[in-house]
Image (cartoon, coloured by chain):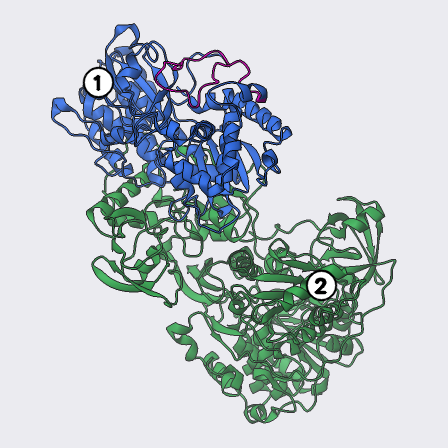
Amino acid sequence: MSDAPGTPLDAPVERTGSAGDAPLVVSSRFDVADGHTLDVYRTSGSYPGYSGLAEALRSTPDQVRETVVAATLLGRGGAGFPAGVKWGFCPPGVWPRYLVVNGDESEPGTFKDRLLMERDPHQLVEGALIAAYALGAAQVFLYVRGEMPHAQERIAAALNEALEAGLVGRNIMGSDFSVDVVLHWGAGAYIVGEETALIESLEGNRGMPRLKPPYFPAAKGLYLRPTIVNNVETLANLPWLFHHGVDAYTSVGTETSPGTRLIALSGHVRRPGVYEVPQGTTTFRDLFEDDRYGGGIRDGRALKMFIPGGASAPWFFPEQVDLPLEGRTVGGAGSMLGSGAVVVMDETTDAVEACYSLVRFFARESCGKCTPCREGTTWEEKILERILEGHGRPSDIDLLLDVADNISPGPYPVAADPSQGLDAVPFPPRQTTICPLGPSSVAPITSAIRRFRHEFEARITRRDPIPVAVAAESVAGEPVGGPGV
Amino acid sequence: MSERPRPVTITDPVTITVDGRPVEVQRGELLIDACERNDAYIPRFCYHPRMEPVGMCRMCLVEVDTGRGPALQPSCMINVAADMVVDTTSEQVAKAQDGVLEFLLANHPLDCPVCDKGGECPLQDQTMAYGPGESRWVEEKRHYEKPIEISPLVLLDRERCILCDRCTRFASEVTDDPLIHFVNRGSNTEVNTFPGEPFSSYFSGNTVQICPVGALTATPYRFKARPWDLERTESTCTTCSVGCRVTLESSRDRLVRINGVDADAVNWSWLCDAGRFGFEATNSEDRLTEPLRRVDGGSFEPTRWSQALGAAADALRSTDPDRIAVLGGARLSDESAYAWAALTKGVIGTDHVDAQLGDGLPVEVLDLPGATIDEVCTPGGTVVYLGPDPKEELPVLFLRLKHAATRDGVRIIELTPMATSLAPYAALGVHSRPGELAAVARALVSGDVPSDGVAGVDADTLRSAADALAAASGPVRIVVGRANLAESGQVVLDAAVELAALPGATFLPVLRRGNVRGALTAGLSPGRLPGGGRLGRDDDAWSSRWGSVPVSTGRDAFGILRAAAAGELDVLVLLGADPLSDVPDRDLARRALDRVPTILALDTFVNPSVARAHVVLPVAAPGEVDGTTTNLEGRVSRLRAKVTSPGTVRTDWSIAADLARRLGSPWSASSVGALRDELVAGSPRLAGTSWSDLEGAESVDGVLADLSGVDPGRIEPTPPPQIDSYSLRLVATRELYDGGELLRRSPSLAGLARPATVGISVGDAERLGVADGTPLVVRGERGAITLPARVSAGIPRGSAHLVHRLDGSDPFELLSAEQVACDVRVEIA
């Protein structure tokens, strides 16, 4: 789920193309041959490479930040918080500060940052430099997911090129601005996508989240210094923004969510891929059915459900397909746009199996710090596994919901269900844990049980008679009827 | 759990509402502590008041409203702020806490009936109090190999572990021995060591004490008792002189466990493993249980107390007091030490008494203005550390100093012959040539640094240290002890006197033996009377109590041994002393003990010196003694007897009282309390430490004696020794695990000593062409020792390092009481 479906390295990927109505802000070099090299970066795509940085360096750091605030550049990592406002959270006068680039993209269904890092590494470096300039960061740490060696190599090569060209290091582009960029490879943990766990990992510790407060990265981040953690795509927007200006940027998308978003579309559509779409004006229906994007549900089947924002997001159903791809709207409808990973499931999908598959992921990736997540996610996994193996008990459905409630005290965010007359519960969920990983595991459970309870019940009550041979075997060996009874 | 909330003084009060009641608390303190002090105890597993909170177990979730509506928050991570409204019992809170408890129990084995923790287990207690009574968990539980040995002293049962991060946090945060850590993920997370690297920390037993379940067990206690069978009493550890408060726990009249008590001024609940597990020596089968007398053939024979005491009294009565001497006393309680001071100085009339064995410091060090551990650790302060490696000799003091340096910004300047365990946390390391410490101290105080340095320390280092002292905010605190056994203690005192010129300087003397300060304060030192009194100045106070006091100042330990070796002594009393092992001049000790006609020994075991005695009186061991002890600061705290002594063993003070009676003295002692009060009544500096003073709840962690300085009199500076450029100068130190009596008699600790090496500097190793492991001969005037080399960056060029009392390493064979420092030749064997 975490990889782009079936695209060999550097093969052309599906994307919007110049459809006339929206510019390509971040993906303009995805299909440009050698777009990852400095020379091609400078001469191709929707802006000349490093022109945005040159523009930014002509302003003061504060002006750069104000430009980003004016553009309402929303964070693309999941929470959708305005990046310029976030930069302003660093306590004034406290130095050194750090910029950390979160390239630990590992949400199941998400594979957009990987393309940004592999296909246009200079764009990311340029964006990070603009942000570092605005922040006055002493160092930039580029944290790239451990399982993305190609991205690591491309960024390393880009940094070397940039260093030789005087774009990184001392006196960048002949200015007074100097900053070093450190490339750090992850060691393979989903939780490190969470910013405080990423900081722990960068410090050389086991990746486990820190509690906020007191460890808000902007105040007490890397080495307990003020630290801004930004997503790869967020920073990749900056070169275009500074080359074309705020007005051009805000003319795309909606007023509250300007610009474009990269959407990683996967699952049961004809053309899965990474698409750059204007925020807020594109609907899920456009995304699934438009020939520029998904091109319809595979084999002409009907849509059963979809995940609008990565594995952590509560599920949507056919009633929600006309919602726009816009953070607040999706949040109000009971889910989240998250990291822009849309997973489509058609009518042949088994809701219990899908739920199990997602919960198992969270159980395996729980870092083990908070008791409810560490023990609760595994418990959920074991109950679902038992149900799938035919050893479910009628009480298991309520047990699942109650275990979920002890990880994320309800009511849990969920989409409206007009057929049952149920309203949506808006995002976000509450949590008994430090970070949202544990509560994320609850999303598939509450979504699936509320909508498809009958599928769970069918699994539980449909129990085949025990064959004689197996029953005889059980006398000599393993008991029949479930483990651990 | 038994931890006390973090101590707090309310200087910046704010009012918060806890369960509907307004309460006044300190701004910024942790909510969990604020609630506990105000009768709203919040259940917890991971929070420990002496460690940084991690908010990991989630048991302490409560509803906190800071104006934006109530939200579940871990109270161990929330700093209180004005007008906070806290609900610790709401339905939401109860549901969340019940949920956490259920999660913790999901994989927890129900082996409470065979678990050592059963009966004192926070998880069990919480479950009994609030648990649902029935489990909804029908899946198979986690299984691990049960238990695994993470160190020779600690076993880990991973199935029982609830992953609270207490032991792992302790290892990394408190002791900086990060040898245990989480491995794996999710519900497969476990605590473990790295393969082949055991959790060999001097403090490993603390992890057992703070484990909230039965996951960590200590080999000496495992399966020995059930908590409800244990009897407990609070006492003080006397393994070294830090004076950690402990609980002595016994079952069927045998000590089975010692746990640390959180004394805020001293040990913060921590103990070292030697102090925690050394109780095994009290239970040892090798204990002396009846008096022994040497018979004509030269072997010992059991005898009756009346005969043994009679023989001792006869020897004392028939000998000129000037030909009687007493060595030792640091093992004794304050009261026993006082009783022996009264017996020797008052009844017998000799002043040849020394509680130290030439391996401490001149008693004048106690006359310097005193500093407490807390004062030394004052946040932002500056400390000159002039003592032994604290981790090896005073382990819990090491924890306090490390905490002060790493958390409270205390700048430590090491002024030691080689780098100690404090080096990683110290601001500066000044490592001078043995014998020349005073010159270094003089340079630091005056700031007058010759360009070629002083005593092997380069000028830059000295200048930085002098600058740091000059820039110190507030008075400088000086920790002074015997860092090098191969260097005269007088040299250290000389340096301390130089440092006393720093404005407001105060001193923490770190003499290492259990109650050495108590013994010296009780008068077991030549020229001294109890309570810091001087012979010739304070005679009246004591002659009125004892009948008389000696007419002239007597000899110290080296003097006593020299006199004995010269045939000038007829009776030598060993009060728990082993001069053959502990006097840093093996030859002198041997000659002395060979020559003295009568040796009386009071001891718990037959050590090498006791083996030479003529009358041996068995005495009570730690855990069997009531009384008080005085720690290195001068803090007096209670010792309590928990178990009955074996055989006919008696206490040291009652032996002194019996001998006084047999010698026809009017002085007598009736009880420990009466002895204490007699000592305090005659000692103005001990005011406030009478027997009844120490019984009050407020004095549970001990009472400080008067620490203000007194004029030590004239101290003759020692001339520095000549430098022999062909030699290395010897540094002899101790380690926590050595071949000492306590360790040898504690089965769990015996065998933990490291193999002996000879340490040399990187520079000397290059010069000699030596690598780690190369066999080296260390040759002194008196003998030679062959050991493998250990090349260390912490040793300055020109010095060689040996450890006392390890197998094959006996630096005392090379040392002479006549030398200020010891030069040795080191060459490849």
Secondary structure mainly formed by the magenta segment = loop
Verify whether residue B579 appears in magenta.
no
Residue A318: image tag: 1
Query: Measuring 76% from the left and 52% from the top, which residue is drawn there?
Result: B760
Q: In the visual, does A136 lie left or right of A351?
A: right
Query: Which quadrant of the view contains residue B111?
Result: top left
Q: CA distance from mark 1 to mark 2?
A: 78 Å
Residue A147: image tag: none
Compared to residue A373, the image places residue B703 above or below, namely below
The amino acid type of the residue labelled 1 equals Pro
Q: Which residues are magenta?
A: A10-38
- In the rendered image, residues at marks 1 and 2 fall on the same chain: no
Query: Measuring 36% from the left and 38% from the top, which residue is drawn there?
Result: A435
Query: Which quadrant of the view contains residue B426?
Result: bottom right
Q: Residue furthest top?
A: A299
Compared to residue A82, the image places residue A421 above or below, namely above
Give how far across and how far down residue A243 sits, in percent: 47, 28
Compared to residue A465, the image places residue B285 above or below, namely below
Chain given the colour blue: A
Closer to the camera, A483 or A432?
A432
Give how far across and how far down residue B455 sits, in percent: 78, 64
Verify whether residue A15 appears in magenta.
yes
Badge 2 sits on which subunit? Answer: B
Give how far across and how far down residue B682 sits, in percent: 53, 88
Q: Colour of chain B?
A: green
The amino acid type of the residue labelled 2 equals Arg
Q: Is residue B417 visible?
A: no
Compared to residue B401, the image places residue A226 above or below, namely above
Task: Residue under label 2, please give it.
Answer: B463
Q: Quick one: SS at disc 2?
A: helix
Closer to the camera, A76 or B490?
A76
